Image (tube, rainbow, N blue to C red):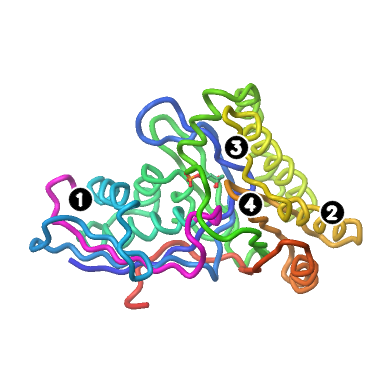
């Protein structure tokens, strides 16, 4: 009753920002994302009848804050009367800082948890379980470029391109260390309830998703760049116009956008996206990644850079 899994975070280019107003943590619209390669969460799950309660550690330290969501996800897989579990998570990048750590965590958890329970679930079943815990986590059950759409009382997913089909590099400019102020679930509900732009945002999602899917099918970087930047700025407009306002950006976030604009003026194929945090994710063909990293490193307020290609789906591993 023990298994280990690894999952990588994913970065959305057509964003998920808003839940349906019914149980199941269902997204209100579709999304499209890139599953990363070199950032990872490794999760070991051991079911043990001798334990009085579930135990969670993250990078070796007890993590009580996340335990409730993690236990609920294991209940979803094994039922409420399952044995208690020891869950040990290791993560090689900053947690809860707008780098999609919950996506890789819950994707790895469903793979390790179901394997430890002896359940043989399909990628779609695992993705649905991960999505009930964290909407974006469902996408990390698939490799490369991934589309997710709500369908009835569930979700459907597909991998649109394997990592080798369209190599891309994501360079992450970290502009602030430490966890974000507002968890994304609460923030989304606040946007739904208070932003005057929320309904309009949802109206535009099918067209943005279709444009992004067409860009991927045609390997059209300029078209993907255009829809991704537009979609990101629309999501942040919804965030900014929520009450209270959700402003995740800082000065360095904006400075990074200037850097991307300057690179674009120089003819570099590159675009930005930003999630519920101040970090800026910059996407380009791999051959431009060094030039882009140099420009971002020289940008005021950038404290660290991370770089990743596109990667594999969440999977069971033998040992880290
Ligand atoms: O799945 P959550 O609750 O971590 O929300 C993810 C929200 C964004 O990262 C901002 C957008 C997305 O589609 O990943």
Q: Which residue is mark 3?
A: 246
For the residue carrying disc 3, how many other residues have a C-alpha within 10 Å: few (<14), some (14-19), or many (20+)? many
Mark 3 in CB contact with mark 2 (< 8 angstroms): no
Gap in angstroms between the C-alphas marked 3 and 4: 11 Å
Provide the secondary structure element on which disc 1 rests: helix
User: Looking at the rendered structure, which numbered label has been put on residue 278?
Assistant: 4
Q: Which residue is mark 2?
A: 261
Q: Nearer the viewer, residue 286 or 276?
A: 276
Name which quarter of the figure residue 234 lies in.
top right
Magenta highlight range: 79-100
x and y, in percent, of residue 228 in the image: 70, 46
Gap in angstroms between the C-alphas marked 4 and 2: 18 Å
Can you say which quadrant of the picture contains the C terminus? bottom left
x and y, in percent, of residue 204 in the image: 66, 30
Provide the secondary structure element on which disc 2 rests: helix
Q: Which residue is mark 1?
A: 78
**Lower position in the chain sequence, tag 3 or tag 2:** 3
Q: Nearer the viewer, residue 208 or 249?
A: 249
């Amino acid at each position: 009753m023990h298994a280990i899994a690894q999952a990588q975070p994913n970065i959305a280019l057509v964003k998920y920002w808003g839940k349906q107003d019914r149980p199941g943590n269902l997204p209100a619209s579709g999304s499209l994302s890139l599953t990363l390669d070199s950032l990872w969460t490794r999760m070991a799950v051991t079911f043990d009848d001798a334990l009085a309660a579930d135990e969670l550690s993250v990078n070796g330290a007890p993590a009580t804050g996340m335990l409730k969501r993690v236990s609920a996800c294991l209940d979803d897989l094994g039922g409420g009367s399952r044995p208690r579990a020891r869950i040990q998570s290791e993560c090689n990048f900053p947690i809860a800082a707008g780098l999609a750590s919950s996506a890789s965590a819950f994707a790895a958890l469903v793979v390790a948890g179901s394997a430890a329970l002896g359940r043989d679930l399909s990628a779609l079943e695992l993705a649905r379980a991960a999505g009930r815990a964290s909407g974006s986590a469902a996408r990390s059950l698939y490799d490369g470029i991934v589309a997710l759409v709500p369908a009835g009382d569930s979700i459907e997913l597909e991998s649109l391109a394997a990592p080798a089909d369209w190599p891309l590099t994501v360079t992450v400019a970290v502009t602030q260390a430490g966890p974000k102020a507002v968890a994304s679930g609460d923030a989304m509900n606040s946007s739904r309830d208070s932003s005057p732009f929320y309904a309009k945002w949802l109206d535009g999602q099918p067209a943005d998703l279709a444009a992004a899917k067409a860009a991927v099918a045609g390997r059209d970087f300029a078209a993907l760049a255009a829809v991704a930047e537009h979609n990101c700025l629309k999501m942040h407009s919804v965030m900014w116009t929520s009450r209270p306002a959700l402003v995740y950006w800082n000065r360095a976030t904006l400075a990074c956008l200037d850097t991307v604009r300057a690179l674009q003026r120089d003819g570099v194929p590159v675009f930005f996206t930003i999630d519920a945090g101040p970090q800026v994710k910059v996407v380009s063909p791999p051959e431009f990644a060094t030039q882009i990293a140099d420009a971002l490193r020289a940008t005021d307020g950038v404290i660290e850079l991370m770089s990743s290609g596109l990667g594999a789906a969440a999977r069971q591993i033998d040992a880290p």
